[in-house]
Image (tube, rainbow, N blue to C red):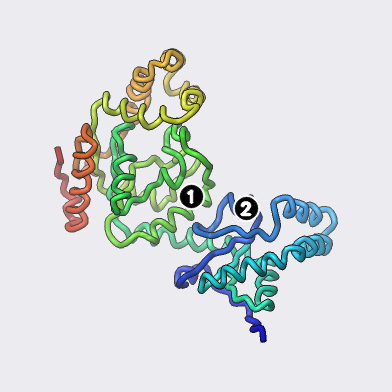
Amino acid sequence: MRMIFKPVELEASQIYLLEDRVLVDIRSPQEFQDSHIPGAINIPLFEDQEKALIGFIYRTEGVEKAMEVGYNIAVRKLDLLVNTFKELSEKHKNVVVYCWRGGMRSQELCKFLAQAGIRVLRLKGGYRAYRQFILSDLPRLINGRQFLVITGKTGVGKTKILRRLKEEGFPVLDLEGLAMHRGSVFGHIGMEGKVSQKMFEALIYEELRSMPQGVILVEDESRCIGNLHLPDALWWKKEEAPKLELLSSMERRIKNIIEEYTRFEGWKEMARDALLRLEKHLGPQKLRTALDLLEKDNVEEFVRILLKEHYDKRYRIDPYRIVGRVDCEDEESCLQQVANFYSRMSLKPEAASSAFLIS
């Protein structure tokens, strides 16, 4: 005899109490791509074109006709959906289904699956409820943690050092990695994909939530990373946090930038396009000089003029927040010194309030 389950709802905050869970986003692929709960898989009830058709019928012929068309589309997929969710329920203890706002898509699908003997949970309020929850909970999560900000001029190697530390198990909030952008006007070069503001905030929340207690390492980003902006609570927490400044010579910085950016196909064209957006900062004469250097493949001097005439002039730091300085001419030595500083700060956080320099 087949067991029939009653659909069960849960609040967004309860997701994190579930063991062995899988989150299933049944919205269209485009909705999922724009933003979703990190870690969720997409099993769309309607494809993008089908959703667009239903929306068009809703606007032109009304809700009843739209529901009829939606039902006729969905009913053809029920056998496949049953098999897919059956497999998921056999692999995972908890299968959580959600749509945009906990409306008809998730309600009707969960009812049908329950009648088919498949136990699933439905996220009350859908993705919208999840987003409301993380936005309200994010300030608490941020303010309850301590940060050590890694700062320094463009090209000193901040991102590389932090990513190596993360590989070694240090708690690093990689904002550029989450944003898929390096933060400058050239920051998109070599970065694939695009992240929405909603997705960026969700990724930050999930990263912070998953980190163990203790000091978190983060790069000294500006308020905006490409088209994305940091949550206000994170921005202010970062501004008030102790900063460890990385130092390096101009020649080393130029070398770091060339190694990082020129390894990507099409970097030169992307750099030229990005450079044109700096005209108001560089002025027409310096812009022409930079473009000429780029066209002549004089990459070292091209990078030098950008650093001297743009990035270094914009570098500002509160000296009272500096708790240490590390020479990064040698990457391995820099890595070890930052790791040692972090370890001392983690053991004795009050040490960060009294500046001591590392050379």
Q: Earlier in the sequence, mark 1 or mark 2?
A: 2
CA separation in Å, label 1 and label 2: 15 Å
Q: Is residue 98 above or below residue 61?
A: below
* Residue at image mark 2: 31
> Relative to residue 102, is residue 302 drawn left or right?
left
Q: Quadrant of the C terminus?
A: top left
* Residue at image mark 1: 200
- Residue 141, given in percent of the width and then of the height, sits at 38, 60
Q: Is residue 47 above or below residue 76?
A: above
Q: Provide the secondary structure element on which disc 2 rests.
A: helix
Name the outermost residue toward the bottom: 1
Q: Residues within 10 Å of mark 1 (few under 14, many from 20)?
A: many
Point 63% across, 66% down: residue: 84
Residue type at numbered disc 2? Glu
> Relative to residue 130, is residue 290 drawn left or right?
left
Foreground residue among 143 and 102: 102
Q: Is residue 131 above or below residue 322?
A: below
| Number of marks in picture | 2
Point 19% across, 51% down: residue: 353
Q: Residues within 10 Å of mark 2 (few under 14, many from 20)?
A: some
Residue type at numbered disc 1? Phe
Q: Is residue 66 visible?
A: yes
Q: Provide the secondary structure element on which disc 1 rests.
A: helix
Point 77% across, 56% down: residue: 54
- Residue 68, given in percent of the width and then of the height, sits at 82, 64
Point 50% across, 27% down: residue: 266
